[in-house]
Structure formats: C-alpha cells, structure tokens
Image (cartoon, coloured by chain):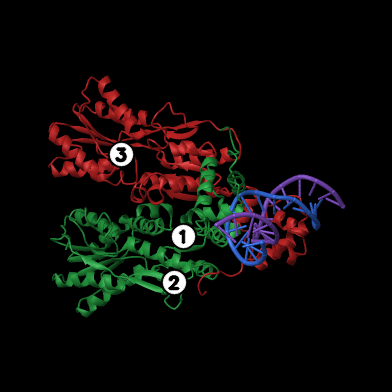
Chain colours: A red, B green, C blue, D purple
Amino acid sequence: MTGVPAGQAPTLEMVAARAGVSRATVSRVVNGSPKVSPDVVEVVQQAIAALNYVPNRAARSLASRRTQAIALVVPESTSRVFNDPFFAALVQGVGLALANTEYTLSMLIESETGSEKTRRYLLGGNVDGALVASHHTGDHSYANVSLSLPVVFGGRPLDPTESVNYTVDVDNLHGAELAAQHLVDRGRSRIATIAGPQDMPPGVDRLRGFTSVLERAGLSADLVEFGDFSPASGATAMRRLLERDASLDAVFAANDQMAIGAYSAIAEAGLTVPGDIAVVGFDDDRYAATAMPPLTTVHQPSIEMGTEMARTLVRLIEGDDVPPTTLLPTKLVVRQSS
Amino acid sequence: MTGVPAGQAPTLEMVAARAGVSRATVSRVVNGSPKVSPDVVEVVQQAIAALNYVPNRAARSLASRRTQAIALVVPESTSRVFNDPFFAALVQGVGLALANTEYTLSMLIESETGSEKTRRYLLGGNVDGALVASHHTGDHSYANVSLSLPVVFGGRPLDPTESVNYTVDVDNLHGAELAAQHLVDRGRSRIATIAGPQDMPPGVDRLRGFTSVLERAGLSADLVEFGDFSPASGATAMRRLLERDASLDAVFAANDQMAIGAYSAIAEAGLTVPGDIAVVGFDDDRYAATAMPPLTTVHQPSIEMGTEMARTLVRLIEGDDVPPTTLLPTKLVVRQSS
DNA sequence: TTGAAAGCGCTAACAT
DNA sequence: ATGTTAGCGCTTTCAA
C-alpha cells in the first residue's frame, strides 16, 4: 500500500446487501442472537466470509455503550514492569482469565502515559473497566475513577481507612511472618531485613510481619535497611547491614530481586549463603529457584492474583455481586539458602 | 458505586448548552482549532471543567475515522516478553516516541490472544496502525494485514524475497562479525558459537556473520550449537559444546541471556571466563554489564529500535513518505569476559 | 423471525 | 468565527 488510507473495510450494510437481508439481521447473526433462522444464519455467514467482514469496534461500542475492553493500569516505569517477574506473572494471569472472554486488554503504563492521560483514557469510554496494579500512595486519581467505572485494585490501599471498593490482595503480613519464623526456627539469632519502600503496602506489611515475629521471639528487630525492590538496591542495603553488624547471620529480603542483590553483596564480603548468612526472599519469582544457592522464599500467587483480579472485574462489569476484598494465601518454599 | 452503570458521562452537547454555543464550536475547542475566538475558548473550557467532560473515544473515532491508537503486536509468550530485556527496551522506546504524540499504545501479546483474534482486532478499526515485533516465519497473517493498515515490522522478514513494506532492523550481520573478529583478534583459535533459532532472522544473521569471519580467518566454524535465546538453553548448548571439544577457548552467544547461561555451564565444568574461555554475547542487555565477569557484547540499540519503529509508523499514518527500511547500527562493547 | 427507524456522541463539510 | 447539517457503522426498540 502507498501511504495512509487502508483498503475500504466492508460494512455491515454491505454484508446485508449481499445476503439479501436487513442490517438488523446481520447484526443479530454477528452477535449470536438465538432468534435467527438457521438458513438465514448460513447465508449471512457466507456473505461475511466472502467479504472478509470485521465489525467496526468504534461503531459497535458507540451503539452498545460497551467497549469489550479492559485496562490494566500499572503505575510504574516501563523498565520496572518488564523486569519484575511479578508483573509478568500478573499480566499472564490477567491474560489467562481474559482469554475465555470477549474482552481485550489494554495496558497503560503510567510512566509513559502520565496519570492525567491515563485518567482521560479510562473516563473517555475506552474501556468497560480497569485493573490497577501496584496501588501507591496518593493514587486518589484512581480511587476517584472507580466512582464512574468498575475498578479492581491489586493490593490494598496504603491507608486502610481509605476503603477502595474492590481489591485483590496477597497475604503479605502472614507471608513475612512465615519467613521470619522460619529463620528463628533455624536457630538464627541476629536476623536482619531488607525492607521494601514504606509507601507501598507490601513494603509495610512485610516489614510488620517480620518485626512482630522477631519481637515475639525476643530478638531485636533493629537491623532494617530499605530498598526499592530492585536487585541493585538489595545489594546496597545488604552492604549497609553488613557494615552495621558484621555478625548478622540471617536476612529476610522483602522480595526475591533484592535477595538476589543481597547474594552478591554477601559474596563480595567473602561470606557464604547459607553458611554464614541465611537468606529468605519473598515472591517466589522465576529467578528464585535457579539462583545459586536456590532461594528460600515466600510463594506469592502472582498468576492467580491476575486471574482473580480479571475475574472479579468481569463479574463487576456484568453486574454480578462480588466480594469487595479477596485475600490470596502465601506459603513458604524452603530451598537451600536458609 | 454499586455495580455497573458508571456515573452519567457529560456529552459534548451538554457542554455546548452550558457554554451557550454550538456543538461544533465545542468540538473545535476540544480539538484545538485555531479559528475560535479566545473568549469563546475560555467560556467553553470553563464549561468543560465544570462538567468534568471527557470526549468519548468511540464517537470521536467513528466520526473521524481515526482511533489515535496504535498496536504493538508481539508474537511471543507473555513470559518471554516480560523477561527479555530486549522487549522491555523496545516497549520503552515505543513509549518514548509516542509520549509526545496523541497516540496511545495497545499491546497485543500473541500467546494470550491468538493470532486470529489479533487480526480481527487490527482490522476491526481499533488502531490506526500496528507495530509488529519479532517477525517470525509464516507471519503471513501480518504481511497480509499491512495491505489494509499501516504496519511497521521490527526485524526483517525471514525470507528476504518476501518484501514486507516497512521494517526497522538492527544490523545483526555486522554485529556478529564484530564479535567474531574480536575473538579472533584476541588470539583465540578454537571458537564456538551458541546460535539462536534458525527460523528467526537474528538467529540466522548472527550465525552467518560469525561463520564468515571465522572462515575468512582460516578457522573452523564447526562448533555450533543452538539455543532458543533463553539462559537455560544457553547453558545446555554450552555443555554440549564442551562435550564436543573440551579444548575450545572462546564462544560467541547469539544473545546475552544465552551467554549468561553459558557462564554457569563453564563454571560447572570448573573453567573460568575469560581465562579458559572467552565469551562474547549480543544485545548488551541490562544484565550484561552486571554479570560476573562483565560481559563483552554487541550493543543493540533496542530503545532506538522502538522509537524508530514508532516514529516510522506515525509518519506512515500521517501520510508522510518514509523509507521502507531502516537499519540501525550495532557496535562492540568490550568488557571483561574476553 | 425479520425489518424499519431512531439514535449512540462526535466530526466535518458547508453555510453564514 | 460560528452554526447547521449530515452522517460515521453499528445496536436496539418497536412493529410487522
């Protein structure tokens, strides 16, 4: 083709003409209405095939006031999204749940789009509903959006009193408790943690779970450094911990990526895992099992979280009753790092 | 909100009424037409703000016959997309180029969607154009789509005679030559390669570049094993190479992920990099620099590829003349693995 | 079971 | 500079 205009797309009207029926009938066939006689269906379908007709989305959604699309809003940078296995799994789960439905997915990555553009997109009738992953502080724009569009949040809101309507979350608190308890049970006595950002609920909850277990065990929970969930930040935090107390014998990282970063800092210091320092991560991402040594971690059902979010949203859109909160269980996966 | 219906969205008509002008004028203001008097613009904008009006996409695109959206089609599995730094960079580049424009991006991941659904989506007037990443064999469905929709392919078609209209590619052949020549120049004499899939152009071109240099240098290019660009496949291939000839002293991996896999196989065999075996990768992905030892590799301008693809497509959509092929240069980045 | 007709909310000539 | 008037391609009552 030369430049712009695209080969003339066949319209419903053309199909109707060719099949010798009305546009309404063609529409019924296209939408699988039961009240069309089989022979007519047959004729129409042949016309559709012959013309290679594909319904126009805009027209359809304008008329029906539905878009058959849902948005997945990710308030993160592109590179984070594409390098964090959690998002990969989440998207996979969403895709899985949507595969059976007629909905298509539109991914909106905040850093590229800007939140105002995103808001306009969501409110401009582009989608029938939205999934918001990684609910940050101050994401009031989206809590706001949920007033006029079905929205399901992944992860609880930072402020628990801010009751966002529908959320699917993972039991971060309990997961962190499992991790910390495991370290205590292993007989470790100087246990540190590389916590996540405290403006993100998982960061908060995982630190809280850790702290409560240590205190219950009569151990000091003072060895805390913070990272941003990236491997590099994990390495940096680990170095600081080692500086602060070279005698520490265990560390709980708030996610696997930071745990992997910690591995390298530990190696740099000439120490071994788990000989000198036991390491436990969180997420059970795809790198956890293949790390050297394989990482003990808390399994987070990321794929299920995606499917659950999508399923919840679709039900919401279709007017079903759904529980406002779904909490998915976490469990400890013991490997060789602890 | 209770379930479905979404708060009644204000229409252009309501804005017009409130501002005391016609719908056409409101439309002009919304679309930034220059021929509206400043005072009217002011009044209209106040009405828009007051009503919190957001234009309806479907209506707009139906009337204007444009969608202001472009699709990025990725014929790969979700997990590959989210774990391959190349895609991350590509998407980033696309996002970057699109950030300045009014186009939004819609990602279609083949494995989730199915290629027929994708085709319908593209042809159903959902987008003004499409970007197809990772052009595989038999992707005739898309060459096909380009008949009725502007399409820019990332990577040349497998069969060079199949002249797909617009492509942006990286100079894989030359990159591989640089890598191989570097190894030769370093005095390595038994040089192997972990090639990529031969049904993908980069796999083919990188192997071809490698082979031609070795032959020119009078060396045997028989030590070839194939992987699928994943780290695991790189490790497996490396093990096979070592079995075939334990005396090999260099290996060129067709991408960094496989090179990293090779690292572990080399370590398993009790050998060192680059002491025993020099390793060169391809892509210069984010793991290359932080690997131990830092990986010598061929820099592939992935981000630029994304921006270039997007820019090309936008020009195409807007009816500009664009060159059918853009070839981006590669360069060698020497680090410590060779 | 099928068709006719009235829009969905907006843009784009064409007038003025 | 602004308004009028047709649709864009489809769904959806309402009648037949």
What residue is drawn where x is 33% and y is 34%?
A: A199
- Disc 1 from disc 2: Cα separation: 15 Å
- Label 1 neighbour load within 10 Å: few <14, some 14-19, many 20+: many
Q: Nearer the viewer, residue B294 or B12?
A: B12
Q: Nearer the viewer, residue D1 or A142?
A: D1
The residue indicated by pointer 2 is B166
Depth check, mark 3 against mark 1: the one in front is 1
Q: Contact (CB < 8 A) between labels 1 and 2?
A: no
Depth check, mark 1 against mark 2: the one in front is 2
Instruction: Tell whether A125 sits left or right of B186.
Output: right
| Quadrant, the C terminus of chain A | top left
The residue indicated by pointer 3 is A255
- Disc 3 from disc 2: Cα separation: 42 Å
Instruction: Tell whether B76 sits left or right of A290.
Output: right
Q: Amino acid at mark 1?
A: Val
**Helix, strand or loop at disc 3?**
loop
Q: Amino acid at mark 2?
A: Tyr
Mark number displayed over residue B73:
1
- Residue B136 in view, yes or no: no
First in residue order: circle 1 vs circle 2: 1
- Residue B26 in view, yes or no: yes
Q: Amino acid at mark 3?
A: Asn
